[in-house]
Image (cartoon, rainbow, N blue to C red):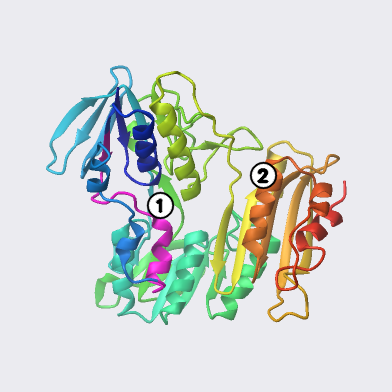
């Protein structure tokens, strides 16, 4: 069997490694457009913020490492077309030469690119994005000559890079076109705590303003000097655009593959696409949501690694028996200075849109007992189904213990537990870790049908 994998990052290399363990004789070829494989972009804000110095720590393996396992990795080889009828891909090498390569089974793991809205001035020097290793290296070098920065977008990367730039001594303005920060991931009750933390560390937060253009510096228009919104002008020495990502699927438009509106490849619970013998995972593809059963776009490293491993098993299977992914819950977390926040499952709006009769509750509690140093507030929001009280989602923000409590909610939602069940779960207790009734117990008991 000949297996071709397009893309050499988390999903692709996880699939390649698993496929090799399943089928020792298969020919496995990975085509990667860049020069780097097994790269973890999640570390970029922390590298920029000097939490570690060696950028290579974000890459786990090299092509040579995989060659020892009998997996051929060809970097600087971009797949530019897919012919599913004849089961071939067209590949362009680093010299611009093109060739076709046949496959028996194919996996697409081409990831996503930083979204780049058509702002005038977006090509000015000093306008940065943060998606690949070179982006982080360039931004970190540029900080040395800057005192002011504007971050556009308050998603996970926007918040993390704002913190990194503050740690590097810059005056930071964060511009978000929506009415609140990180609104796509967190509800208002959680976002307001994050906004307060940003302000406490000197970040100028601008919400409800859309960027219209980047302006060059007077007398040197090749370098950015200001960000223009519909309301104001913000002088700056550099800009970081963090307004989301776009799946790298343009080369598939003529293939007949089914895509979501944003360009993500639609996959089923086995990782299969609409094309025969073609699978997909990672930031270029959707996954099935565990609660709704519908395709959902969630460009997260955890999902990419899990789906990649499963597809590696399925793509190398000779028996026809396939492993099934139980679905994802959109579990995600962020640290913003001294505050940590996490979410899992559905928000209120998402639950209503999915057709659930929905209720929610918000409580304010403490992370542990008052007589142990370091007690700090926790805010918990539960989303649950009316009547049954089945847990549908949860969001937590606090200074200590917030995110790991979200992990407990992920288990509870996966198990189909109710808020009543949550109220009685036997969580571990000691004064430095919780109160005798943990905050999750309290939230579960407050939630009513």
Q: Is residue 369 magenta?
A: no
Q: Which residue is mark 2?
A: 350
150 lies left or right of 224: right
Query: Which quarter of the figure has residue 388?
Result: top right
Q: Position of residue 383 (x, y in %)?
A: 74, 49
Q: Is residue 263 visible?
A: no
Q: Position of residue 110 (x, y in %)?
A: 35, 41
Query: Which quarter of the figure has residue 213?
Result: bottom left
User: Which of the marked residues, 2 or 1, is nearer the chain's N terminus?
Assistant: 1
Along the line of sight, the residue nearer the viewer: 133 or 410 = 410
76 lies left or right of 183: left
**Can you tell which of label 2 and label 1 is closer to the viewer?**
2
In the displayed structure, would residue 252 be above or below residue 140?
above
Badge 1 marks a residue whose secondary structure is loop
Q: Position of residue 234 (x, y in %)?
A: 44, 74
In the displayed structure, would residue 151 be above or below residue 323?
below
């Amino acid at each position: 069997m000949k297996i071709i994998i397009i893309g050499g990052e988390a999903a692709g290399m996880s699939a390649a490694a698993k496929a090799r363990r399943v089928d020792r004789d298969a020919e496995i070829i990975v085509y990667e457009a860049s020069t780097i494989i097994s790269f973890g972009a999640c570390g970029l804000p922390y590298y920029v913020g000097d939490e570690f110095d060696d950028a290579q720590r974000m890459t786990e393996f090299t092509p040579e490492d995989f060659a020892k396992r009998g997996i051929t990795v060809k970097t600087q080889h971009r797949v530019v077309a897919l012919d599913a009828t004849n089961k071939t891909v067209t590949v362009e090498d680093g010299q611009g030469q093109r060739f076709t390569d046949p496959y028996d089974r194919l996996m697409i793991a081409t990831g996503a690119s930083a979204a780049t809205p058509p702002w005038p001035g977006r090509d000015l020097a000093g306008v940065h994005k943060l998606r690949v290793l070179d982006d982080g290296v360039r931004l970190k070098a540029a900080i040395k000559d800057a005192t002011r920065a504007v971050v556009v977008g308050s998603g996970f990367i926007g918040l993390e890079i704002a913190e990194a730039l503050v740690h590097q001594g810059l005056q930071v303005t964060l511009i978000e076109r929506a009415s609140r920060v990180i609104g796509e991931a967190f509800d208002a009750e959680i976002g307001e705590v994050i906004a307060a933390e940003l302000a406490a560390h000197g970040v100028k937060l601008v919400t409800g303003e859309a960027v219209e253009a980047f302006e060059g510096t007077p007398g040197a228009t090749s370098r950015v000097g200001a960000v223009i919104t519909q309301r104001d002008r913000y002088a700056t020495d550099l800009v970081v655009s963090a307004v989301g990502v776009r799946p790298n699927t343009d080369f598939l438009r003529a293939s007949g593959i089914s895509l979501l509106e944003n360009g993500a490849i639609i996959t089923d619970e086995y990782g299969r696409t609409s094309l025969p013998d073609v699978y997909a995972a990672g930031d270029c593809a959707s996954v099935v949501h565990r609660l709704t059963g519908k395709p959902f776009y969630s460009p997260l490293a955890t999902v990419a690694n899990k789906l990649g491993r499963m597809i590696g098993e399925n793509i190398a299977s000779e028996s026809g028996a396939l492993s099934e992914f139980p679905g994802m819950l959109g579990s995600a977390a962020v640290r913003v200075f001294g505050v940590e926040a996490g979410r899992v499952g559905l928000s209120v709006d998402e639950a209503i849109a999915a057709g659930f009769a929905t209720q929610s509750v918000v409580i304010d509690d403490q992370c542990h007992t008052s007589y142990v140093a370091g007690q700090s507030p926790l805010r918990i929001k539960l989303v649950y189904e009316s009547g049954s009280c089945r847990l549908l989602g949860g969001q937590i923000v606090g200074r200590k213990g917030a995110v790991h409590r979200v992990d407990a909610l992920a288990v509870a939602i996966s198990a189909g537990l109710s808020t009543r069940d949550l109220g009685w779960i036997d969580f571990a207790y000691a004064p430095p870790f919780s109160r005798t009734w943990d905050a999750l117990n309290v939230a579960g008991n407050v939630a009513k049908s």
